[in-house]
Image (tube, rainbow, N blue to C red):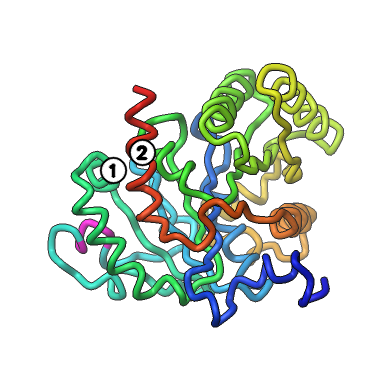
Amino acid sequence: MVEGSAFGRLLKFGDASDKKSAEIIAVTSGKGGVGKTNLSVNLSLLLSQFGKRVLLIDADIHLGNIDLFLGINPDYNISDFILNQKPIEEIIFKCPQGIDLLPASSVVKELIESEDEVLRKISAEFKKIQHKYDTIVIDTGAGVSRTVLSFVLSADKVIVIATPDPASIADTYGIVKIVKTTEPNMPIILVVNMVKNQEEGDSLFRKLDLMAQKFLNSKLIYGGYLVDDEQIARAIKIQSPFILEYPNSISTLHFKIIVKKLMSIPIMDRRFGINVFDRLIDNKEIILGRE
């Protein structure tokens, strides 16, 4: 990539001339149990290996368990900032694997539904440290709750995970429909998980992409596929990130393909560089307008 090109400048997240240019990526799914958090963790680690300074935010208020995937035990979460006035620098946990983690806890739901003053307080503190990161990955909850949509619509890019399960396909289309109806230009990258082979993965993507084109007049971006791999379940069981436990496996190669595809997609100009918590404030009105 030519660094002086427009595309090169777009992806040069760490430029000192723009300290607010962290790219925000939301990882979500229509239903639980499809491998969302596993992807969020390994995606973050790979971005770090590719030279990005990464902050991972655990925003899954019901099944938030990033600490288990990383084998860590953070002392604090965002509730300590809100309730105990703990500095946000102390809440962010520096993982031994090379990324930072902001543990969110169940207080996220109350945060989204609270007065804007709380979000503004967090935003003001976050502005002090956000320039330290090139990429912010948000592991959202599953489904289309107000909290999930608030984070999804705050992103520059959205990764949606689907599996061949009919319920997952239906729920995936549901979340794509809401996002595209609300923000038509949002890049949605579809990652197909737990498939038997590439053919099944490609077929599932084409099916969902055709649905999006026919009914939403929009196209999805194919991020890639992950096969149903017993080693992934084994890595989760021993609380070790998959790409670190099995760096030479075929599935790790597939993870890398997904990350490289993600990095090649330009960012929307709409809100590039705006604090993620400021975006949440803006999105509250959008979400409330849908209810």
Residue positioned 63% across, 33% down in the render: 162
Q: Is residue 265 above or below residue 73?
A: above
SS at mark 2 in the image:
helix
Residue hosting label 2: 147
Kindly indicate whether the residue at mark 2 contacts the one at mark 1 (C-beta within 8 angstroms). yes
Residue positioned 60% across, 58% down in the render: 42
Residue positioned 78% across, 34% down in the render: 201
Q: Name, please, the residue furthest toward the right.
A: 199
Specify the quadrant that holds the N terminus: bottom right
Majority secondary structure of the magenta segment? Answer: helix
Q: Which residues are magenta?
A: 77-81
Neighbourhood count class around disc 1 (C-alpha, 10 Å): few under 14, some 14–19, many 20 upward: many
Q: Name, please, the residue furthest toward the bottom.
A: 16
User: Which amino acid is tagged 2?
Assistant: Thr
Neighbourhood count class around disc 2 (C-alpha, 10 Å): few under 14, some 14–19, many 20 upward: many
Q: Where's residue 123, x and y in %?
A: 31, 61
User: Which label is found at residue 112?
Assistant: 1
Question: Which badge, 1 or 2, is on the more N-terminal residue?
Answer: 1
In terms of depth relative to the viewer, which is nearer, 184 or 13? 184
Specify the quadrant that holds the C terminus: top left
User: Which amino acid is tagged 1?
Assistant: Ile
User: Which label is found at residue 232?
Assistant: none
Q: Where's residue 210, x and y in %?
A: 77, 23
Residue positioned 76% across, 44% down in the render: 224
